[in-house]
Image: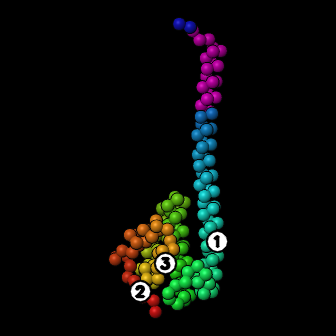
Amino acid sequence: MASLGFSDVLSLAQTVAIISTLLITLYFSRKQIQTMGLDLETRVLNDLDEKLHSLIALSVESPKLIKMVYDPPYEVTEEIPYAYYVLFMCAHAYHMKERNILSENEWDGWLQWTKNAFRQGKLPVYWKEKEMESWFDPSFRKFINTEILTPSNVQAKKPK
């Protein structure tokens, strides 16, 4: 059996240290790339949300503009774009929770806000009777229909 000299042990230790450093660097680089990807996705989604926000703001100012994208079988009042905007905010918060961007405490606040808006306002009527649910993605629709629109949460009020 060959015995290792001091220089051989030192060389082996340096090699192990270099390989360990490379593996640690690779691990953290991979984590950073994943985080950058999530940040990029979030920026793109926020950019789209800002564009939608601008469209909704125009619709709130002039409800007749809604007919450019949807010609409803009922009269368009100021409440329609406002109700959609409130739902849009709730959907945005919901999607930020799905992407783990909101903390549990922030989400609990938004969840309570959403429940209160559906319980105390006319949102359930607009969600179902005015068919606003069809303008949102399936995941958010399921969330509203199963977790928010429960008999204990909602006492729907009819619009005047």
Q: Residues within 10 Å of mark 2 (few under 14, many from 20)?
A: some
Query: Rounded to the nearest whole Å, what is the CA distance between mark 3 and mark 2?
Result: 16 Å
Tell me, yes or no, if residue 134 can be seen here: yes
Colour scheme of the picture:
rainbow
Q: CA distance from mark 1 to mark 2?
A: 31 Å
Q: Amino acid at mark 1?
A: Lys
Amino acid carrying label 2: it is Lys
Q: Secondary structure at mark 2?
A: loop
Compute the Cα span from label 1 to label 3: 19 Å
Task: Indicate which disc, 1 or 3, sits on the residue closer to the N terminus.
Answer: 1
Image vertical order of residue 5 relative to residue 13, above or below:
above
Whether residues under marks 1 and 3 lie with C-beta atoms below 8 angstroms apart, the answer is: no
Point out the stretch of residues depicted in magenta. Answer: 3-21
Mark 1 and mark 2 lie on one chain; the one further toward the N terminus is 1
Q: Which residue is mark 2?
A: 157
Q: Residue at x 43, y 75 (%)?
A: 115
Residue 106 appears in view: no
Per the image, label 1 sits on a secondary structure element best described as: helix
Instruction: Name the residue that disc number 1 marks.
Output: 51
The amino acid at mark 3 is Met
Task: Give the SS element for disc 3.
Answer: helix
Q: Main secondary structure of the magenta part?
A: helix
Residue 5 painted magenta = yes
Name the spot of residue 2 as percent of width and height, x first: 56, 8
Locate residue 79, reporting x and y percent.
53, 86
Residue 157: percent from the left, percent from the top?
Answer: 41, 86
Q: Which mark is residue 132?
A: 3
For label 3, the crowd category at 10 Å Cα-Cα, with few meaning under 14, some 14 to 19 and many 20 or more, is some
* Residue at (46, 79) in percent of width and height: 131
Q: Is residue 159 left or right of residue 16?
A: left
Please state which of residues 149 and 6 is positioned toward the viewer in this rendering: 149
Residue located farthest toward the left when viewing the structure as drawn: 151
